[in-house]
Amino acid sequence: MFDDEPLPDAAPAPAAPLAGVPLAERLRPRTLDEVIGQRHLLGPGMPLRVAFDAGRLHSMILWGPPGVGKTTLARLMAGSFDAQFIAISAVLGGVKDIREAVERAQVAAAQGRRTVVFVDEVHRFNKAQQDAFLPHVEAGLFTFIGATTENPSFEVNSALLSRATVQVLKSLDAEELGQLIERGSAELGIAPPTPEAAQRLIGYADGDARRLLNAFDTSASLAQGAQIDETLLERALGEQLRRYDKGGDQFYDVISALHKSVRGSNPDGALYWFARMLDGGVDARYISRRLIRMASEDIGLADPRALRIALDAAEAYERLGSPEGELALAEAVVYLAVAAKSNAVYKAFNEVKAFIKQDQSRPVPVHLRNAPTKLMKELGYGHAYRYAHDEPNAYAAGEQYLPDGLEGQGWYAPVPRGLESRIADKLAELRRLDDEASAGA
């Protein structure tokens, strides 16, 4: 569970392949310059590059999808600063492991050596386990680095977040994955895959460097020195690659079929395409993100419960994993399919964005402006603003909320379905009150 072997500042590439060592491990970067991707953090003048160059080691949360280099970056930090590296898996570890890490950090500190404590999947630790790090991070006993695939705003304690910066890592793009294939070919001493096979490998990896290298390693073993082509790639990766090619049209066609079945209120079709995606090896987390999008785009305020159900299903899957958590996603698929449909918010939001993009920058009406200073009050900021809660029915009839020149402009048009039919009735009544107020002015 622990690993206290820091990487050296630099290490030459091995002269020959290391038998039995996975390709992903053999290609693990040993210097920052060897890292592929994350230029927004590691490029010249970027946050982590500056920290490395300045010798400033600080606690942080590395947030990003699988296979983008979170563990590698943590190891590089420890190696660059000659710090003891202690790794804890939040899936397997607990308070006992944290206590042992603290003791080892105290021994290192007594010897004048710094320590980096790396917690993989830190979101799996509960509040008490996360709190156990706080006093030691505060005291500077060690530098804390957490890695997570989940939004730290929701999964990491605010107290711990306040003591660490959050660095967002991105999936590798096609060009970066192509560079990995080139390095893998050189490491294995074989010809690069055919362009078609390389493209399918890149699509199969879906931004995950580890997944790409493991698939490439498996294919190279099967090739036994021959060039990897599409046929050999399919033999190596099996049914998953043949039936569900993430680099090809079928991947997007099946996603489209699921989305359109939900939009078309057909639960059987939606379930069928959902099961096809799972059977094809799609990450259920990806599906859950698409369901959340569907709830916002195609259902909206016609049934606001849909978004909550999609979010709950995603959380249930995170807690249960496969296959148990898939049932929660199936439940969300059916609910979204049978829910009342509206894209009114989706349309209105897009129309407002398009309008603002081409419109001038209109000033905020004076009565809506904030007035925190005496001068602003003297200039009339906030003057004549009508506090809605003090008005009949908590509605300031006739009040202007859009900039001058946009009076009467409207974008949101609720549909006559589900809850939005009631929203439409309410808005009609409010407009009637506005008209009465205008006529009496």
Image: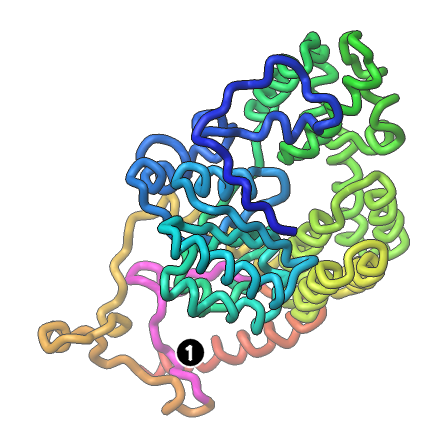
Q: How is the image coloured?
A: rainbow
From the top left corner, tell me how far across and down residue 415 is, in percent: 65, 64
Q: How many numbered marks, from 0 up?
A: 1
- Name the residue rendered at 67%, 52% in the picture: 289
From the top left corner, tell me how far across and down residue 119 is, in percent: 56, 54
Q: Describe residue 239's horizontal placement relative to residue 92 as left or right.
A: right
Q: Nearer the viewer, residue 270 or 431?
A: 270
- Name the residue rendered at 82%, 57% in the picture: 326
From the top left corner, tell me how far across and down residue 376 is, in percent: 14, 72
Which residue was labeled with disc 1?
A: 434
Picture layout, residue 190 above or below residue 123: above
SS of the residue under disc 1: helix
Callout 1: few (<14), some (14-19), or many (20+) C-alpha neighbours within 10 Å? some
Q: Describe residue 66's horizontal placement relative to residue 154 as left or right.
A: right
- Name the amino acid, label 1: Asp
Q: Main secondary structure of the magenta part?
A: loop
Q: Nearer the viewer, residue 113 or 297?
A: 113
**Quadrant hosting residue 221:** top right
- Name the residue rendered at 20%, 75% in the picture: 371
**What residue span does the magenta drawing correspond to?**
394-413
Q: Is residue 130 magenta?
A: no
**Quadrant hosting residue 377:** bottom left
Q: Nearer the viewer, residue 189 or 289?
A: 189
Q: Is residue 396 magenta?
A: yes
From the top left corner, tell me how far across and down residue 273 is, in percent: 85, 46
Q: Describe residue 415's horizontal placement relative to residue 330 as left or right.
A: left
Q: Nearer the viewer, residue 185 or 133?
A: 133
Q: Is residue 140 visible?
A: yes
Quadrant position of the C terminus in the picture: bottom left
Q: Describe residue 125's horizontal placement relative to residue 197 as left or right.
A: left
Q: Is residue 341 visible?
A: no
